[in-house]
Amino acid sequence: MTTSLNTPLCDLLGCKYPIIQTAMGWVAGPELVAATGNAGGFGFLAGATIPAEEMEGEITRIKDLTDAPFGVNFHMYQPNASEIVDLVVKHNVRAVSYSRSPGANLIKKLKQHDVVCMPTIGLPKHATKAIELGADAVTVQGGEGGGHTGAIPTSLLIPEVIDAVDGRVPLAAAGGFQDGRGLVAALAWGADGIAMGTRFFMSHESSPPQTTKQRYVDCNNPAEIIVSKALDGLPQRMINNEILAKLENAGSLKKLILAMQNGLKYRRFTGASITSLFKSALAMSRSGDITLAQAMMSANAPMIIQKSMIDGKPQEGVLPSGQVAGVITELLSCEEIIQTIVAEANDRISALSKLSGES
């Protein structure tokens, strides 16, 4: 028995399979996004860590590599957010993804140009609020997911959010997915597909150097992939390594000094002024989800992650990761990843159909 696996999420995004490659800073570049699209999935470009002057070139590079639709991820409060929205509209990008509190004026502009808005959320109330603000779909990440994450396991969170959404928009489940069994489980809960970061990070087409990818392959224990607030004051799941251990032991003053130093580096990277960065941090804190100190500390993340993802020094940079890295033993191409998931999902659906007496 072979199914098409077509869901409302596929129809909304224009992809063949309900499999989304999430945007990972320094990781989800044009090659990974295009390879995902060419394999039948839907990829998001990591716009939050691309210098403003290079953003348009990255979008056009994807369009050179694939005819498949794709999306762009960014933080609504990053200094060049409005410029990214302009580029998304200019190049007819299919979708955007974002987290934290969105800017209503930017969402309005995206909606006016039929760009799919697909925020990542971690609680039922956040999903409801996102839909009220115009979200066309939501990605729901459980606690097993990499990077910033919550405390509720995926298996408990997804059904709860599905009930809250009540069919108003398609929903992608994230956090702990890497195979066809997970896809079928998500569909059985009522989701319309899955979103994966770590599995696509551990692919041939992702941007980081081989030395960094090998560190993920070598992590064969999910318990070593912990949640810490040491990086930016918010819960973030990462592989435990040398730099994370130092951050965990650092005092509040040392962390704040580090955040200010990285904020200046990030300013040079994005071309933003110190004033605009402070205003962005203030806007993030006023959303009510984080404090001003946490917003200022958020500058730590991109610059320390850069050490591992760009420089190829995993011992000197943090390693954001979902717990599934602990059970993934090899790097594959995007084509291999997606086709393996699809084949396994069809096998599981066929086996389940026999339990109900269907042929």
Image (cartoon, rainbow, N blue to C red):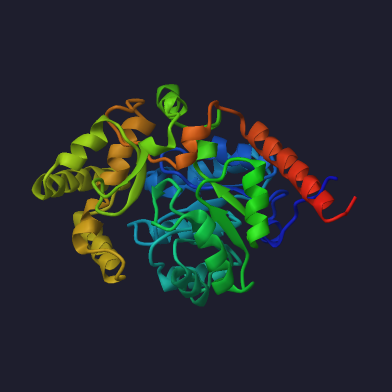
Q: How many marks?
A: 0
Answer yes or no: is residue 175 visible: yes
Residue lying furthest bottom in this view?
132
- The residue lying at 56 percent from left, 35 percent from top is 31
Above or below residue 159? Residue 67 is above
Q: 109 left or right of 4?
A: left
Residue 63 or 331: which is nearer the viewer?
331
Occupied quadrant, residue 41? top right
Q: Position of residue 84 (x, y in %)?
A: 45, 56
Measured as percent of width and height from the top left, residue 260 is found at: 16, 48
Give the residue drawn at x 69%, y 35%. 340
Question: Is 237 left or right of 33, judged from the image as shown?
Answer: left
Q: At 25% across and 59% down in the image, what residue appears?
A: 276
Q: Whole-percent x and y of residue 172?
A: 58, 57
Q: Please determine whether, in this image, residue 315 is positioned above or below residue 71.
A: above
Q: Residue at x 47, y 27 (%)?
A: 217
Task: Name the foreground residue: 150 vs 153.
Answer: 153
Quadrant where the N terminus is found in the figure? top right
Vertically, is 331 above or below 269? above
The image quadrant that residue 118 belongs to is bottom right
Is residue 207 depicted above or below 92 in this figure? Answer: above
Q: Is residue 138 visible?
A: no
- The furthest residue to the right: 359
Residue 203 is left or right of residue 190, and the answer is left
Q: Is 260 positioned to the left or the right of 56 in the image? A: left
